[in-house]
């Protein structure tokens, strides 16, 4: 998957060689492979793009009470950063994997993530205990016994998780951006990937926000948690970027596990409130889902995104953060690679970069 903006909507004013070549290669690639979008090209508008000024009594999009309501219900332009769009088979290729902690820094990062997971489980009442064999308990009894979460519990957990998950990418991008300015040197492609991760996590939050409006107490909890986590991660990234990427890799392992359990419960009929719930329009637009997609399809897509972050951060943690090129700057591995492998080792990342350069050179020569 080449790093390109929306395949069918590459703006003419963008003269970036890599993105234009990437779009060309995507169209000429083997059939059945989804690069960014599997939707047919959108024909150019028949009317002029210059619109007449709205009447004075027209409600401005900027003043609508809900920011989510301003999101179009169809593809109208390149309004987000690059992000993968998955085929159904790719979304089911995800495996729950774990990166063994070998160094002291890795072990510390993993233990911090496990501690955070324990605290979050305790506060949210999440236990996910094994249901006793042959149990005849009703769904309500299973929920009261701590064996299952209801839809409110799942939504609280997901919303809180996504408000925190969007922090590391933005912190990393900010610090690497400032370093590039301060030292007056190239960043080797890391900044864009970090920004894309941050926005992708934010889009997860925007999606699940459409299911419920959070209370002022929940928002206050998020405010405190985000303030503490942002500053701690900021200081930690200054000290050891590599350890921070490893920490995020372990954090995404937990996210993949959580969404996998949610999918299992939903498919087993243990969250009946969500069984036939339609996918929010913002999710259909963002992941290019079918118009009749369900919430289950959205959760599959979100889990695939978390798998991507797991693979990317563990791979970045295997590199020299000061000198190595980001292997994901030009090309995105497919989901079979990211879903069944925990990371690129440094030698594998180098090979991947060389292959990406070879592909780009070949396209330029054609």
Image (cartoon, rainbow, N blue to C red):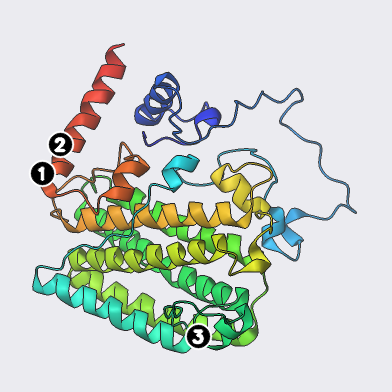
Which is more toward the observer, 270 or 320?
270
Regarding residue 172, the answer to whether it shows in the image is yes
Residue 351's tag is 2
Q: State the CA–CA distance, disc 1 to disc 3.
A: 45 Å
Q: Which residue lies furthest to the front in this view?
A: 134
Which is more toward the observer, 104 or 178?
104
What residue would you read off at disc 3? Answer: 146
Q: In this view, does 258 lie above or below 53?
A: below
How many marks overall? 3
Q: Are marks 2 and 1 in contact (CB under 8 Å)?
A: yes
Which circle's residue, 1 or 3, is located before the other in the chain?
A: 3
Residue 192 on image: x %, y %: 35, 49
Q: Which residue is drawn at 64% across and 48% down?
A: 293
Quadrant in which residue 306 is drawn:
bottom left
Residue 91's tag is none
Q: Residue furthest top?
A: 366
Q: State the CA–CA distance, disc 3 to disc 2.
A: 47 Å
Q: Which residue lies furthest to the right in this view?
A: 57
Query: Crowding near pointer 2: few (<14 within 10 Å), some, many (20+)?
Result: some
Q: Residue at x 52, y 78 (%)?
A: 148
Regarding residue 85, the answer to whether it shows in the image is no
Helix, strand or loop for disc 1: helix
Which callout, 1 or 3, points to the residue nearer the camera? 3
Residue 104 on image: x %, y %: 10, 74
Quadrant of the rendering where the C terminus is positioned: top left
Q: Residue at x 54, y 46 (%)?
A: 287
What residue would you read off at disc 1? Answer: 347
Q: Are marks 3 and 2 in contact (CB under 8 Å)?
A: no
């Amino acid at each position: 998957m080449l790093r390109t903006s929306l395949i069918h909507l590459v703006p003419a004013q963008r003269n970036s060689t890599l993105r234009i070549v990437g779009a060309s290669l995507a169209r000429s690639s083997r059939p059945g492979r989804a690069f960014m979008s599997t939707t047919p090209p959108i024909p150019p508008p028949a009317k002029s793009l210059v619109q007449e000024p709205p009447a004075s009594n027209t409600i401005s999009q900027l003043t609508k009470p809900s920011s989510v309501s301003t999101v179009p219900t169809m593809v109208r332009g390149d309004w987000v950063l690059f992000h993968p769009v998955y085929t159904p088979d790719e979304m089911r290729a995800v495996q729950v994997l774990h990166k063994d902690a070998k160094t002291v820094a890795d072990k510390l990062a993993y233990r911090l993530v496990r501690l955070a997971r324990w605290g979050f489980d305790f506060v949210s009442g999440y236990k996910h205990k094994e249901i006793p064999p042959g149990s005849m308990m009703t769904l309500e009894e299973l929920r009261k016994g701590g064996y299952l979460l209801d839809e409110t519990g799942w939504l609280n957990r997901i919303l809180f998780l996504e408000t925190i998950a969007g922090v590391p990418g933005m912190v990393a991008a900010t610090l690497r951006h400032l370093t590039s300015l301060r030292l007056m040197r190239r960043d080797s492609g890391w900044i864009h990937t970090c920004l894309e991760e941050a926005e992708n996590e934010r889009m997860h939050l925007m999606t699940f926000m459409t299911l419920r409006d959070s209370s002022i107490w929940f928002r206050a909890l998020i405010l405190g948690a985000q303030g503490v986590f942002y500053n701690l991660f900021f200081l930690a990234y200054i000290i050891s970027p590599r350890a921070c990427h490893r920490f995020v890799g372990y954090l995404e392992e937990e996210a993949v596990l959580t969404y996998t359990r949610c999918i299992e419960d939903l498919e087993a009929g243990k969250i009946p409130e969500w069984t036939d719930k339609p996918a929010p329009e913002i999710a259909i637009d963002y992941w290019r889902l079918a118009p009749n997609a369900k919430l289950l399809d959205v959760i599959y897509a979100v889990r695939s995104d978390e798998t991507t972050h797991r693979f990317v951060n563990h791979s970045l943690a295997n590199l020299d953060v000061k000198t190595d090129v980001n292997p994901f700057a030009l090309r995105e591995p497919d989901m079979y690679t990211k879903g069944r492998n925990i990371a690129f080792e440094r030698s594998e990342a180098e090979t991947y970069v060389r292959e990406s350069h070879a592909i780009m050179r070949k396209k330029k020569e054609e």
